[in-house]
Amino acid sequence: RYTSTLTNSTFFPVLLLFLSSPLQWDAITEMDEHNRPIHTFQVCHVMEPNQNNWLRSNWIFRQAAQKVYVELRFTLRDCNSIPWVSGTCKETFNLFYYETDESHGVKFKPSQYTKIDTIAADESFTQMDLGDRILKLNTEVREVGPISRKGLYLAFQDIGACIALVSVRVYYKKCPFTLRNLASFPDTVPRVDSSSLVEVRGACVEHAEERDTPKLYCGADGDWLVPLGKCVCSVGYEEMDGACFACRPGFYKAFTGNIKCSKCPPHSFSYGEGAAVCNCEKAFYRAERDPPTMACTRPPSPPRNVVFNLNDTCLQLEWSPPSDMGGRRDLTYNVLCKRCGPEPDQCQLCGEELRFVPRPQGLTNTTVTVMDFSAHANYTFEIESLNGVSKMINYPRSVAAITVSTDQGGPFMVGMLKKDWASQNSIALSWLEPEQISLLVVDYEVKYYEKEHEELSYSSTRTKAPSVIITGLKPSTCYVFSLRTRTSAGHSAYSPKYEYETTDDTSDMASDQGQVLVIVTAAVGGFTLLIILTLFFLITGRCQWYIKSKMSSDDKRRTNYQNGHALPYPGVKTYVDPDTYEDPTQAVHEFAKEIDPTRIRIERVIGAGEFGEVCSGRLRTLGKREIAVAIKTLKGGYVERQRRDFLREASIMGQFDDPNIIRLEGVVTRSKEAGCGQALIPVTSLTGLTDLVVLCAVISGRPVMIVVEYMENGSLDSFLRKHDGHFTVIQLVGMLRGIASGVRYLSDMGYVHRDLAARNILVNSNLVCKVSDFGLSRVLEDDPEAAYTTTGGKIPIRWTAPEAISYRKFSSASDAWSYGIVMWEVMSYGERPYWEMSNQDVILSIEEGYRLPAPMGCPVVLHQLMLHCWQKERSQRPKFTDVVSFLDKLIRNPSSLLALVEDIQGLAESPGEVVDYHVFISIGDWLDSIKMSQYKSSFVAAGFSTLDSVAQMSIEDVRRIGVVLIGHQRRIVSSIQTLRLQLLHDNGFHV
Ligand code: ACK
């Protein structure tokens, strides 16, 4: 039977053949307990000794597989239940394979076959079971590979057991053809090595093109992981249901990308399908640089209301903008000048002697000044309005014209300018209106200046009436006045100059006294204000001086350093960057206790650090107690800089005092020079030569050490990998809570860790997690995960927030991102974040919005918290104090952890394949098949005795019946899901 019950698997047809040997397997059809026929191969020569009965499969074409899975279902008779067979009866059989390119005519030679495994039954049946018609079916799966030949044979060797082989299924796993982000990915066979992923490049679907190379990774179980890059629909095509469709008539799409087709802009149309741009209607145009999204436009109408002002030397033309701008805003004007004779057709273009201010062409204002024109001439000025599409047409131009005769000027000269009265600061003038003037007077302009200053700077004022009072003048000063008229034809020339004087100071005594009073009042008020302000500044100034003088040098530590700026942080102890000390040794002694090395006993080397070995040992405390410690050593032969960098960590660690931060016991910095073998450090338990060598290195020269509390379980990443699946969710959440609480303490102190990762967390024997590895940038230099970025820094890419990677913006919010990655590491038992992806791909995928999926068995709430930590906008990431209280709530209310991500994805993600289910499986068989036999009695005791009832079980039920370990819960729940699918299919549902 070789139909599929497995996702992403391809099955091979398998046929079993008899082989000629004296005692053979038999093909037998039996009835199961439901009276349904089962076809089996059986052998049961338990009485005779030295059995060697072979059954071989057909040649199985390998196809693309590199590794195949063989699933066997069989029953096996318990030898004890058969009388008189001791010594000859066996309870195992052997599974073999033979790789070959030849598909036919291969003679069976046992010596060519390689053994895959000896297969034993988890459940054997007895005579009694037979009587009750209970078949105890065993399921065993074995992997075979890597396979390189074209195909293989399988063979079964019986050596004297009583076996019925019910089914053999041979299959391999593949990532099935899929469409993602408008790219298609072919069927892909995973690598034989299950820890590495196959990178597959997708091909864009029709009418789509690559934006960033579309990629997926094929995982060992045939799942597609980590979509990267994408294709986007080409111009004229839009995305719908994973394909690119042409824009309908009347619509267009001018750019590639996953945007929708848009309606044609005003005054444009598209008749066909798949238009990249819409064409303009008649008499409408698109300028060269107009985007296709812009409406089609037309040239503007001519300018309106052209007038001119003319005086002796200047001719100013003015006009109003056109009534129709043609739908654009890039309006300009050109002025063309023609000088004409007495007849209108005797015109020619003006020569270069005429000056236009600012210029004759490309004007943006509605005025231009013309100079150096001839007197007694007729000029015609054509003012043309233009916009970006004017040059698309030659005719008609949008022009307004005006004719100016430069003869004008004298006729509307005014009469004499008369002084009516004068005061200390003002002079009143009046004049007679001009006579015999055909044009309407618009206004008069009076120009005046101090006589002493000639005409260097003058003022002017305009008035519509033939009189004016000029104010703001100096007393006893002579001013020069002249006047001109403005009509619709422009300005007249100025009148002759008139001189008038203001009166002197004494003539206005009363007002002067008033002014004195005001000044005195203001002075008194000002003085009072001055006294009040002086008093105020004296008091506050004193306070500031007092505050400054109180801040002695050791108050430095009360200052919170963030991004190099000192922020006062009242009431909370804050972190002091040791680099702010001129002498780093002073920082070490301020924050770390000096330990007399005779109090330390080194016992074992437990690892290697950047500066030297890490040892475990004992420290005699001042109260004569001995405590376990870890001792970080600085290699002999160090230079001063290395010593400073090494001790920097102690200067930082020594400032912290929190149950979730690794505790500094002290440092050894002042011991005397010692040679190899000198008993500076009493060594009582050297275990071997290596330790001896190491210790020599430690004690030669001037030994320098950092002594910290001992953490029995070492670093969190290797600890979790070693104990995969061994903890309950609550235990894992407890660890996460500890880490969050430690980082909360650091962020409250104003310290940014920058390298939070499971490898930098230590675990003690009570599973308490503590943050370690301090030292800011130096930490990153040490970290083997740290890689150089384009901005030059060394950064552990997979753990670091995007803003810290791209512009080194490290903050407690970037620590929150790293904390999210630590959560993921914990929930996946030390899996490498982003698996085998390259750093570059990690950066790209994060930028595109990809985030790590929930690890197997991860409660939904925890994955949500991770996603919260991985918000792109750093201000939206959670604060550590919120993370701690959230985790506390989960611990108090564990039912919130019950919903697993798989539960939610559940059936929705199941494959649509044909399912074949062997109905005679018992609960025991099922638990055996997933290697969870130890829970058989728990299932039965809790009343879950049929597969139907098991299929209804929730994760909560699984926990309730006593499955505590999360790894076991994971295995059982995922198998229940498969079971559910199988039952659904058996009941006629296709999922
Ligand atoms: O994973 P591990 O066993 O835990 O290997 C590394 C090694 O030293 C190099 O760093 C271990 N280690 C570091 N500090 C301590 C400590 N305080 N207690 C116990 N082991 C430690 C770490």
Image (spheres, rainbow, N blue to C red):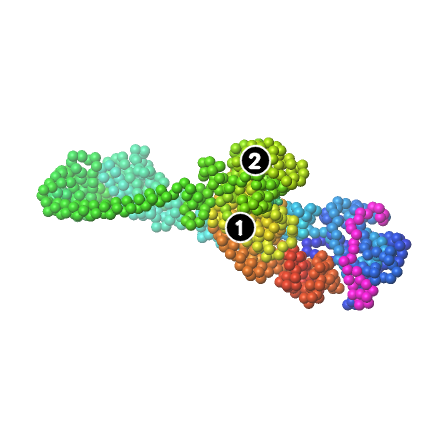
Magenta segment range?
A: 108-136
Question: Residue at left 36%, top 40%?
Answer: 362
The foreground one among 381 and 944 is: 944
Relative vertical location of residue 240 with respect to residue 756 in this rendering, above or below: below
What secondary structure is marked by label 1?
A: loop
Question: Residue at left 35%, top 39%?
Answer: 361
Q: Which residue is mark 1?
A: 659
Which amino acid type corresponds to the residue marked 1 in the rendered image? Pro
Q: Is residue 813 visible?
A: no
Judge left or right: residue 358 versus residue 563. left
- Quarter of the rendered structure image containing ligand 1: top right
- Residue 422 is covered by the magenta coloring: no
Which amino acid type corresponds to the residue marked 2 in the rendered image? Pro
Whole-number angstrom distance, CA of label 2 to CA of label 1: 29 Å
Mark carried by residue 703: 2
The image shows residue 410 at horizontal and vertical percentages of 18, 40
Question: Residue at left 83%, top 46%?
Answer: 112
